[in-house]
Image: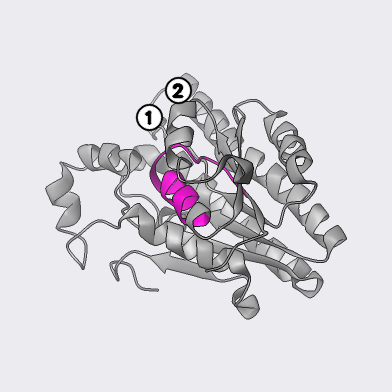
Amino acid sequence: MNLSGKTILLTGASKGIGAATAQALGEDGAHLIAHWGSDRAGAEAATAIIPADRKCLLQADFAKPDSADALWREALAWRGTIDVIVNNAAINLWDGGIYDNDEIWDRVWAETLQVNVLAPARLLRNAVRHFRERGGGVAVTISSWAAQRGSTNANAIAYAASKAALHAATKTVARAYAKDNVLAYVIAPGVVRTRLSEQFAATQGGESVVTGQLTMGEWIPPSDIGGLVAFLATGKCRHLTGATLDVNGASYVR
């Protein structure tokens, strides 16, 4: 994939899927705006292969309501335009289930919705406005199969709901602005080899239990997601807009 000349804003670039995506986009020649929340060292490592003139590292704490708009303004100011936005950053808190007390429930839902829905939705909104002005652009949302099938961990109810919300928002953008050459895609990964997935496995009885439920008998390498994002960023398959791309090794076939 040749991404030379394209400016891409990627959120959550410091670890896991975000780090692998940053590397893939950098290898394919993109000018990358790599967002990080609390791990600058991780973002620096993920973008180490990218020349200094092709990368810009920006910090934003999505738990703060005004952070997404501020990030967008800083990102746009770097090169004066953005061709692609990749909404990847998210949190998954391991409490806030049905039987937790009201205080925990309210805190987890409020924080999860702020970080996983409200912040990326603001970025998506800014991106659509910008894309329409410049004649088009690409938005990629990293969702989860939990958005479609729910989570096997009842304490992740807020996480699953948040992923479904942004999933629906992205589909709405695809349907509403396809004629304006605004392309919007959703990637729904299954069990990816990330720190969050390892923490999730611990709540399910360990990695062997989770792996035993997977059709291919293995976890997804983050590079699979990164490579798919790089392809979507090219905009070569315009009529794929609105699609949800399942990446789960045939463990969940719709």
Q: Which residues are magenta?
A: 9-25
How far across and down, in percent of the image, does residue 33 sit?
Answer: 62, 43
Q: What residue sits 46% from the left and 65% below the top?
A: 228
Read off the residue under disc 1: 95
> Left or right: where does residue 108 sit relative to residue 175?
left
Residue found at x 59% / y 58%: 140
| Front in this rendered view, residue 236 or 172 | 236
Compare residues 169 and 123 and report the one nearer the observer. 123
Q: Secondary structure at mark 1?
A: loop
In the rendered image of this protein, does residue 12 appear above or below residue 23?
above
Q: Is residue 32 left or right of residue 178?
A: left
Crowding near the residue tagged with mark 1, few <14, some 14–19, many ≥20 C-alpha atoms within 10 Å: some
Image location of residue 23, percent across then percent down: 45, 50
Q: Tags 1 and 2 in contact by the CB under 8 Å rule?
A: yes
SS class, disc 2? helix
Q: Residue at x 48, y 42 (%)?
A: 47
The answer to whether any part of residue 39 appears in the image is no
Residue 88 vs 44, above or below: the answer is below
Viewport quadrant of the C terminus:
bottom left
- Residue beneath the point at 56% across and 58% down: 29
Q: Quadrant of residue 242?
A: bottom right
| Horizontal and vertical percent position of residue 101 | 42, 22
Mark 2: amino acid: Ile
- Tell me if mark 2 has few (under 14), some (14-19) or many (20+) residues whose alpha carbon lies within 10 angstroms of its own: some
Residue 14 lies within the magenta run: yes
